[in-house]
Amino acid sequence: MPYSESALKVAIVGFGTVGSAVARILCNGLNQPLLRLTHVFNRNVERKKVDWVPAHVRWCENIEEILASDADVMVEVVGGVNPTGEWVKRALQSGKSVVTANKQLIAQCGAELAEVALRAGQHLAFGASVAGGVPILSGLQDGLAGDHLYKIHGVLNGTCNYILTRIESTGIPFAQALREAQEAGFAEADPTDDIDGYDARAKLVILSRVGLRAEVKPEQVVCHSIRPVEMMDFAYAHDLYLRSTVRQIARAELRDGKLYASVQPAILRRDSPLAQLEGGQNLVVSTGVYGGETVFSGHGAGGNPTAVAVVSDLVAVSRNRSQGLENLSSGATSVYPVSNDFVTPHYVRFTVRDRPGIIAALATAFSNHGINIEAVLQRPDCAKAALPFVITLEECSTSKLESALDEIGKFDFLTQAPVHLPILS
C-alpha cells in the first residue's frame, strides 16, 4: 500500500523494546495511509540497525537531527525526565507534535509541557504512559466525558502484581519472587520504582489529572513498599476475610474539598475484581456520580501492548490535526489539598517476644487514640522469641493509626516494626 501524501512523518526517539515495537507496527503497512516512519534516533545507533526497517528511514544518534528534521511528530520512548523533558519541549516549540509513553515525565512535567504544546499549536499525547495497551486515558477523557468522576483506584504496576501473586500461590519469600520477576522480564535490575510504589504513583498522578481533573504532584502522594509483605499476610487474610488477598493498590478520591491519594499494599476481599488479577495484569476502576463504576483491564506492560497505545495516539494525532487533540492542559482544572488520611478498617501484624500483658498494652495504646480492636488472630506453633499475630481494627483514619503505632513503637517487646495494611471493601 503506497504512502499518502498527507501521511504523518514520524521520528522515533529511542529504539529499545517499545521503540522497536512501534517501528514494526509502522513498517507493517497497516497504517501507511496515515503514518510514515522517517527517522530513528538512538545512542550508538549502528548496533541498533535492523534490516526490516525501510531504506528511506534515516538512522541518527544526534538528537539535533531529529529536532531539525521535517518529521511532523516525535515519538519519545527513551524514558526518564532528563534530558527527555528538554527534548520534548524543544520538539513542541519547533512545530512537532509529541507522543510519549514516559509516565515519569508526564507525571512530573506534563502540565507544563501541555501548555507548551498549546502555545505552539501542537499535540501532546500520552495514552501509553498508563497501563500500556489498555486505553484507560482515552476512556476517561472521551468515553466518560459526560460523567463527573470522583474516584479512581486500581492495580497499576504489573511487577508488584506478579511478585505478590507468586508469593501467594507458591509461598516463596519476597526476595525469591523478585528474582523470578527479574528473570521473567517483569522487574528491572533496580526494581525500586516498582516495588516501592513510585511507578504506580506516577500513573496515579496522570489518572487524577485526566480523570478527576485534579492537579497533583508526585511527591504529594504517599507510597508504601510491598517489601514487608510475607506469605503469612496472605494466610491471615485468608483466615480473616473469606479468602481475601493482598495487592498493591493506587487510589485517588475527591471528597470534602480534598484529594485523598496513596499507593500501598492492601487487603482485598476476593469478590473484588482487583483481587482476581494474576501475574502482570493491570486493572483500573473509575467511579462517577452518574455512571457508577467502569472497569479497564488488560496487560499493562511489555513492548507490544505499549507500542499499540503509542501508534493509537499517532493515529489520533493524524486524524485530528485540524480539529485539535485533547491534551493534559484541558484535563487538570483544579488544585486541592492532598491527603492520605483515608478512613478504613486496618490489618496490623505484630512480631513480639512473647510475655504476659502484650495484648493489654496494645489495646490500651489503640484506645488512647480512639481506635477499637475488631479481632485478634494468632496461628499456632510459632517461636515465642519472634511470635507473629494479627490485630484487625475497626474503621479509623490513617493519621490516628500512625499516631498509635508511634506510641506502640516504643514497646520493648517488639522484635520488628509492625506491618499495617488498609482493608478495602
Image (spheres, rainbow, N blue to C red):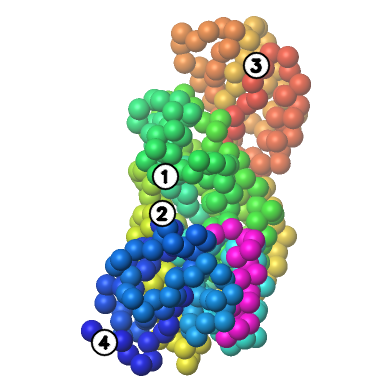
User: Which of the numbered marks, if any, corresponds to residue 301?
Assistant: 2
> Which residue is the extreme one toward the front?
46
Residue 123 seen: no
Magenta span:
79-95
In the displayed structure, would residue 253 be above or below residue 164?
below
Q: Which residue is mark 1?
A: 186
Relative placement, left or right, of 109 versus 374 is right
Classed neighbour count for the residue bearing mark 4: other residues with Cα under 10 Å, few (<14), some (14–19), many (≥20): few
Residue at screen point 35% across, 27% down: 170
User: Which of the numbered marks, if any, corresponds to residue 337?
Assistant: none
Numbered disc in front, either 4 or 1: 4
| Mark 4 secondary-structure assignment | loop
Residue at screen point 63% across, 77% down: 90
In three-dimensional space, the C-alpha distance between marks 4 and 2, rounded to whole angstroms, equals: 32 Å
Instruction: Give the amino acid at mark 1.
Output: Phe
User: Which of the numbered marks, if any, corresponds to residue 2?
Assistant: 4
Instruction: Give the amino acid at mark 3.
Output: Thr
| Pointers 1 and 2 in contact (C-beta within 8 Å) | yes
| Mark 3 secondary-structure assignment | loop
